[in-house]
Amino acid sequence: MEFLLISLLVVLSLFLRWVISTFPYSGMNTGPMFGDYEAQRHWQEITINLPASQWYKNSSDNDLLYWGLDYPPLTAYHSWLVGSVGFMLNQSWVELHGSRGVESYHHKLFMRYSVLVSDLLVYIPSCLLYSNSFSHKVSWHTLLSLLLYPGLVIIDHGHFQYNSVSLGFFILAVAFLDRNRILLGSIAFCLALNYKQMELYHAFPFFVYILGYYFNQKTSYAKRLLGVACVGIAVIGTFLVCWAPFSHSPDDVLAVIHRLFPFSRGLFEDKVSNFWCSSNVVFKIKTIFTQSTIVSLCLFTTLLSILPSSVKLLTHPSMINFKYALVISSLGFFLFSYQVHEKTILVPVVSSLLIVDQEPFMVALFSITSIFSMLPLLIKDGLLLAYVATTTALAFVLFALYGSNLNNLTKKLLTAATGLGVTILTICAVAVRPPERFPDLWPVLVSLFSCAHFILYYLYFNYQMIIGHSQHKLKSQ
Ligand SMILES: *[C@@H]1O[C@H](CO)[C@@H](O)[C@H](O)[C@H]1NC(C)=O
Ligand SMILES: *[C@@H]1O[C@H](CO)[C@@H](O)[C@H](O)[C@H]1NC(C)=O
């Protein structure tokens, strides 16, 4: 019976992905730069035609100003793998120089299938493992939300990216740690980090939890030290394997690192619902401080934002504290760090789905607001209908599941405020022409509204982890 239900859920999640994939993608028919779809295709072209040492370096065959590779090596290997299949199907899709901006029906099918296959191989199995689907204690709410959270589906299968690969490895890592398989968990997390550098948002909680895990064991010092040392070796080993093709010279490694952290691209580019972009409305920080001051300021505020939860986790390294810390740390990084993109909100939201059993109400609100925060991008991509349909469906499901729990006034008010705000601003952004003096009015309001929510969630999760601790300790036992 459980097996049947789980299969049905997986089929439903594939169906949702399939439907979304019929929508347009980022940069469709908008040369000469196109968008993320062309970026991913271009990386296939670069990786299958050039030796690895050239992938991250500017040359006459690899103009980095045209969608230069800016994710870590695992993304590059994945591009190489998909590109090799593409080459077998139709060489013109990945021809060096000649394939720029390829757009055809069959190519779109090929690209869409590559995301679907990645989900089937990495993301979906990780979600099944995390939610105990292979045992008799299936965590249904978690499985349901991980498989069907529309934000991730719309960005990966609509807009076009492979976020679910790194997020899948991340979920796998937490699932391993959940089962006390520390070494496997560390390796899975290194894979996530080597696929997308945004997984750095989770690095502190992993580090602190694993340290706390060993130091609170009731064994001899030597054994505990040995445990930590083994993790260290596993981490270094995984990195060495991932970076092996670039290890011929320090120059190659530096070239990659330089591409991964493009400080010169500034504090933020498009509108993003974080602290810096929102405060920019009244306080033009970019013009007041030099770039290096801003970088230091970001570093300081980000570290400050994760300090309380890290201290709590270090002194109380329980699994549930670890999961709260993952949400808080990734949200802190999203709000305060340097060079954040609007799509990166997926990292904190997916982390929060891991505690949906403990925090159904806040996680529900967070899911809705997060998709809304990407509205300007979704409108630009032609994904408005996908956004409205999935968000409305999500709101109905959540209301059916938890509507009867809205017993206190704060929750009722918050739900009403979020629902009204999201609806009104969506209608405005789509149908109301902004005043001439403020052409950016709607995107700015969307990001201010979302940012205020994210700060609220950030404070709430901190409160729950640090003060409401005894309550969820009871629940999780
Ligand atoms: C990279 O190389 C291309 C082509 O050789 C050149 O046009 C471009 O200016 C170079 N970019 C940088 C950042 O050096
Ligand atoms: C290969 O792809 C190109 C561009 O998408 C298309 O024009 C061509 O017809 C395709 N060739 C085959 C054999 O399908």
Image: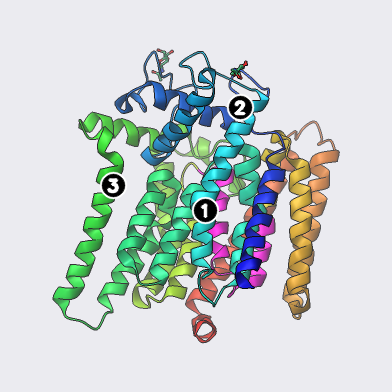
Left or right of 48 in this view: 473: right
The quarter of the rendering in which ligand 2 is drawn is top right
Find the distance from the CA under tag 1 to the CA under tag 3. 21 Å
- 1 and 2 marks in contact (CB < 8 Å): no
- For numbered disc 3, what is the local secondary structure? helix
Q: Residue furthest left?
A: 222
Residue 289 image offset from top left, x and y in percent: 46, 39
Magenta region, residue range: 340-368
- Distance, label 3 to label 2, CA atoms, is 33 Å
Residue 13 falls in which quadrant of the image?
bottom right
Q: Which mark is residue 123?
A: 1
Is the residue indicated by label 3 positioned so its CB lies within 8 Å of ligand 1? no
Q: Give the number of the mark in front: 1 or 3.
A: 1
Label 1 neighbourhood size at 10 Å, few (<14), some (14-19), many (20+)? many
Asked if residue 253 is positioned above or below residue 302 in the image, the reply reads above
Provide the residue designation for mark 3: 239
Earlier sequence position, callout 3 versus callout 2: 2
Q: Residue at 36% of width from left, 22% of height from top?
A: 50
The residue where tag 2 is placed is: 107
Percent position (x, y) of residue 63? 43, 18
